[in-house]
Amino acid sequence: MPGHSPIFNVPVCANSRSQSTPRVRPVCVSRRRVAAGVDGWAMLVVPLIACLIFCGCDQPPPANPLSQFVIDRSGTNQLALIYVSLGPGPGPDSESFDFHSLAWQIKSGTNWKDRVVVTKDDFEAGSRHKRWVSEIHSLDASSGNATIKVAEHWDTNGGPVVYSWREWNMVSNVEVRLVRVCKEPFEPYSGKRFKLFR
């Protein structure tokens, strides 16, 4: 769709221990009367605990695999990359996700509260290309700069996607510097600066 970032499809699995394990139904404990006392209590509790540990007891699927969170060294600032589900994907047992926002969050007690949120529309504003955040690396709370991987369609009709690591100011929502252009989509951050022009 023009003006939108691509939709990502990932397999869905109800067992939180493994993405490839099929849905496992919990073991049922019979309702027979059990003699009162510790032995009777243990006979009921042990199978239930085993069910929770090994089966996941039919829990809902884990949070989407594209959202990411990185906490700074102080432990009081967090960078959150948020993707949202768009519903079922094109394949069986798949789900579609889309970039939603990039948020700088601060710790308030045991919770995280948004300090700055850059929405999908805010992030694409002012660019000639369709772009979205595909990965995050770090947040420097003193400068407000985040190190992020940006994905861009350089062709107006979609075309190939170019990935690059950049420093991005969260408060101003502007690129501070291009760190480097990636050779492949899943290239990790190395911190080496790439020079585009001499």
Image (spheres, rainbow, N blue to C red):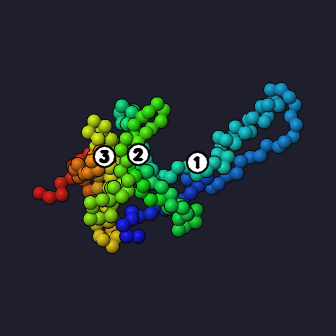
Upstream in sequence: badge 1 or badge 2 = 1
The amino acid pointed to by label 3 is: Met
Report how far apart the C-alphas of labels 2 and 3 lie in the structure: 11 Å
- Residue 138 screen position, x and y as percent: 34, 42
Q: Residue furthest left?
A: 198
Taking the image as shown, residue 167 lies to the left or right of residue 105, namely left
Q: Select label 2 or label 3 by which is in front.
A: 3
Q: Select label 1 or label 3 by which is in front.
A: 3
Which residue does the numbered mark 3 point to in the structure image? Answer: 170
Secondary structure beneath dot 1 equals: loop
The C terminus is located in which quarter? Answer: bottom left
Q: Nearer the viewer, residue 49 or 133?
A: 133
- Residue 145 screen position, x and y as percent: 28, 43
Report how far apart the C-alphas of labels 1 and 3 lie in the structure: 33 Å
Using the rendered image of the protein, determine whether residue 71 is visible from the camera's viewpoint: no
Determine the residue positioned at 31% across, 46% down.
170
Q: Would you call the spot at circle 3 few (<14 residues within 10 Å), some (14-19), or many (20 or more)?
A: many
Q: Is residue 192 above or below residue 75?
A: below
Answer with the quarter of the image where residue 13 lies.
Answer: bottom right
Q: Nearer the viewer, residue 198 or 126?
A: 126
Which residue does the numbered mark 2 point to in the structure image? Answer: 80
Upstream in sequence: badge 2 or badge 3 = 2
Which residue does the numbered mark 1 point to in the structure image? Answer: 16
The amino acid pointed to by label 2 is: Ala
Upstream in sequence: badge 1 or badge 3 = 1
The amino acid pointed to by label 1 is: Ser
Q: Select label 1 or label 2 by which is in front.
A: 2
Taking the image as shown, residue 178 lies to the left or right of residue 119, namely left
Determine the residue positioned at 37% across, 41% down.
115
